[in-house]
């Protein structure tokens, strides 16, 4: 089940955070609870992606995205992700999550997120491709950014993000298997 109470708590804790702009790092703190574990007593890979939600949604609040969505009747969806898992997160480990809205292309907004253990090691990292939607389809990201108070073009996405975007254009859809 989706951790709605946990999300409500995160939104409450971060309700008065300062504004975050594209390219700025937003930090949240989390704990790996017993119900986050898999059979090997570590943070479940699916729950990891859910915990990244717990950092992105308060980021959306602090960046003005959630306000823009509400004012315009828009929705928000994850349109792709590429996670990397490198260190185990165990029960009761404290996690510092860093979320950075890195920019956009013609359809999608890209957000980079990472989870850091208390010893300073990066445990997990993900690039999220997100789309803002309306009843007529995908909303142009530059329109969304303007509603959030961002003027000008997208910040540079960086070479590895551009390479991932390019690789995704070569991925067959629908899949063969």
Image: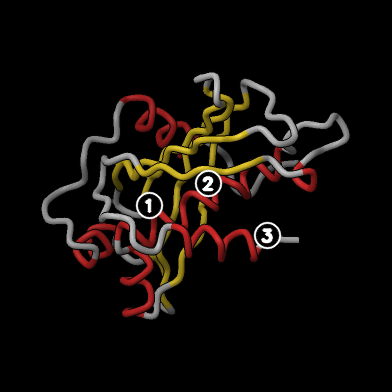
Residue at x 58% of width, y 41% of height: 172
All told, the count of numbered labels is 3
Please tell me which residue lies in front, 125 or 121. 121
Q: Is residue 2 above or below residue 29?
A: below
- The location of residue 103, given as percent across then percent down, is 29, 44
Please tell me which residue lies in front, 44 or 102. 44
Contact (CB < 8 A) between labels 2 and 1?
yes
Q: Secondary structure at mark 1?
A: loop
* Residue closest to the far right: 39
Q: Picture quarter containing residue 89?
A: top right
Q: Which mark is residue 3?
A: 3
The residue tagged 2 is 80
Residue at x 26% of width, y 40% of height: 23
* Residue closest to the far left: 152
Quadrant holding the N terminus:
bottom right
Residue at x 46% of width, y 31% of height: 167
The residue tagged 1 is 108
Q: Secondary structure at mark 3?
A: loop
Please name the colour scheme applied to the rendered image: secondary structure
Could you classify mark 2 by the number of other residues whose Cα lies within 10 Å: few (under 14), some (14-19), or many (20 or more)?
Answer: some
- The location of residue 22, given as percent across then percent down, is 25, 46
Quadrant holding the C terminus:
top right
Could you classify mark 1 by the number of other residues whose Cα lies within 10 Å: few (under 14), some (14-19), or many (20 or more)?
Answer: many
Please tell me which residue lies in front, 129 or 173. 129
- The location of residue 5, given as percent across then percent down, is 64, 65
């Amino acid at each position: 089940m989706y951790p709605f109470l946990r999300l409500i708590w995160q939104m409450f804790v971060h309700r008065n955070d300062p504004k975050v702009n594209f390219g700025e790092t937003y930090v949240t703190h989390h704990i790996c609870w017993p119900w986050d574990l898999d059979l090997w007593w570590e943070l479940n890979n699916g729950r990891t992606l859910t915990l990244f939600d717990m950092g992105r949604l308060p980021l959306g609040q602090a960046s003005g995205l959630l306000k823009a969505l509400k004012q315009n009747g828009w929705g928000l969806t994850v349109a792709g992700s590429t996670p990397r898992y490198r260190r185990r997160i165990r029960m009761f480990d404290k996690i510092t999550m860093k979320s950075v809205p890195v920019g956009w292309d013609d359809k999608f907004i890209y957000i980079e997120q990472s989870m850091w253990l208390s010893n300073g090691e990066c445990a997990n990292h993900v690039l999220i491709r997100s789309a803002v939607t309306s009843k007529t389809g995908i909303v142009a990201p530059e329109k969304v950014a303007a509603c959030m108070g961002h003027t000008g073009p997208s910040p540079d996405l960086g070479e590895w993000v551009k390479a991932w975007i390019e690789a995704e254009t070569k991925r067959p859809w629908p899949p063969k298997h």
